[in-house]
Image: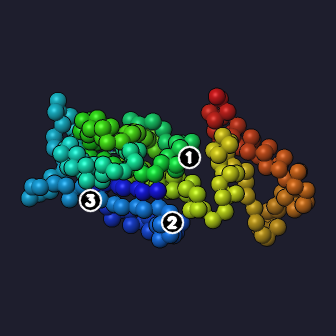
């Protein structure tokens, strides 16, 4: 999978070099390229923003640098990429969307800042790829970079070969629409707190039933919305 990221703070993505995704990059499973949006400006101040038409607080990201950045990234020969713009006004990013995007050969992430990106950029981008405006959650961040880091991690770990033991992907929260069951490891007693005896019983059927009950109970109490559908 090829991943391109455009940002005015490209060094934020140095963190992707660490751990899982770092190994995936070294092995070639993930080809991640980060681009500085200011490299696509031509004025002395490398301007990427301007005041909003119609007034209002803050600044809006100018369309020209984005157009040049997208043109430079999306080559004619490429398979049509998915172009993701994180946005508080986007569709909620979910495990299901992460799974869907983990099969895309080419993902492009456009990280906005200020009060967002000129709307015409999304329209132009739809000529180059399948545009998705996605939100990390119902709160406002200062820009798209933190959201894109989270999305790349959630998507990247689902790419076959990135996670050592694919089994561990199956029983995660949200994979089956429920929250995950609690986990325990040695010692069996820690500060007078014991591991649930069923987990020490060796009875795999009883363990499976207990874990399913725990998933349902946790989901009922913490995320009843997941059971609503
Ligand atoms: N994913 C995700 C996100 C983001 C996110 C993603 C991308 C950008 C780019 C810029 N910002 C900052 C911003 C965005 C909107 C507003 C509201 N303004 C009101 C007046 C009209 C203009 C917009 C304020 C500041 C971003 C925030 N926040 N939360 C998520 N889950």
Separation of residues labelled 2 and 3 (CA atoms): 22 Å
Say which label, 2 or 3, has the lower sequence index.
2
In whole angstroms, how far apart are the C-alphas of marks 1 and 3?
A: 28 Å
Left or right, 188 with respect to 35, comes to right
> Local crowd at mark 1 within 10 Å, few (<14), some, or many (≥20)?
some
| Secondary structure state at the residue bearing disc 2 | helix
Q: Is label 2 in contact with label 3 (beta carbons under 8 Å)?
A: no
Tell me the quarter of the image containing the C terminus.
top right
Q: Position of residue 37 (x, y in %)?
A: 24, 55
Q: Residue at 64% across / 38% down in the picture?
A: 223
- Residue 174 falls in which quadrant of the image? top right
User: Residue 43, can we see it?
Assistant: yes
Residue at 20%, 34% in the rendered image: 56
Which residue matches tag 2? 24
Which residue is denoted by mark 3 in the rendering? 36
Say which of 97 and 75 sits in front. Answer: 75
Estimate the x, y position of residue 209 in percent, counting from the top left: 84, 46
* Quarter of the image where ligand 1 sits: top left
Mark toward the start of the polypeptide (2 vs 1):
2
SS state under label 3: strand
Q: Quadrant of residue 202?
A: bottom right
Which is more foreground, mark 2 or mark 3? 2
């Amino acid at each position: 999978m090829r991943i391109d990221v455009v940002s005015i703070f490209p060094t934020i993505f140095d963190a992707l070099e660490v751990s899982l995704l770092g190994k995936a990059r070294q092995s070639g499973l993930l080809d991640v390229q980060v681009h500085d949006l200011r490299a696509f400006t031509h004025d002395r101040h490398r301007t990427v923003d301007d005041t909003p038409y119609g007034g209002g607080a803050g600044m809006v990201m100018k369309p020209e640098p984005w157009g040049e950045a997208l043109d430079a990234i999306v080559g004619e020969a490429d398979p049509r990429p998915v172009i993701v713009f994180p946005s508080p006004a986007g569709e909620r990013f979910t495990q299901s969307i992460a799974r869907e995007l983990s099969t895309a050969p080419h993902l492009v992430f456009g990280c906005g800042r200020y009060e967002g990106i000129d709307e015409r950029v999304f329209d132009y981008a739809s000529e180059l790829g399948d545009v998705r405006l996605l939100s990390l959650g119902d709160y406002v961040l200062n820009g798209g970079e933190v959201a894109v880091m989270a999305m790349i991690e959630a998507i990247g770990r689902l790419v076959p070969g990135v996670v050592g033991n694919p089994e561990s992907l199956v029983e995660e929260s949200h994979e089956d629409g429920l929250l995950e069951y609690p986990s325990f490891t040695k010692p069996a007693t820690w500060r007078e707190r014991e591991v649930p005896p069923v987990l020490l019983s060796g009875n795999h059927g009883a363990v499976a039933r207990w874990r399913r009950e725990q998933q349902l109970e946790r989901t009922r109490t913490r995320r009843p919305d997941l059971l609503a559908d």
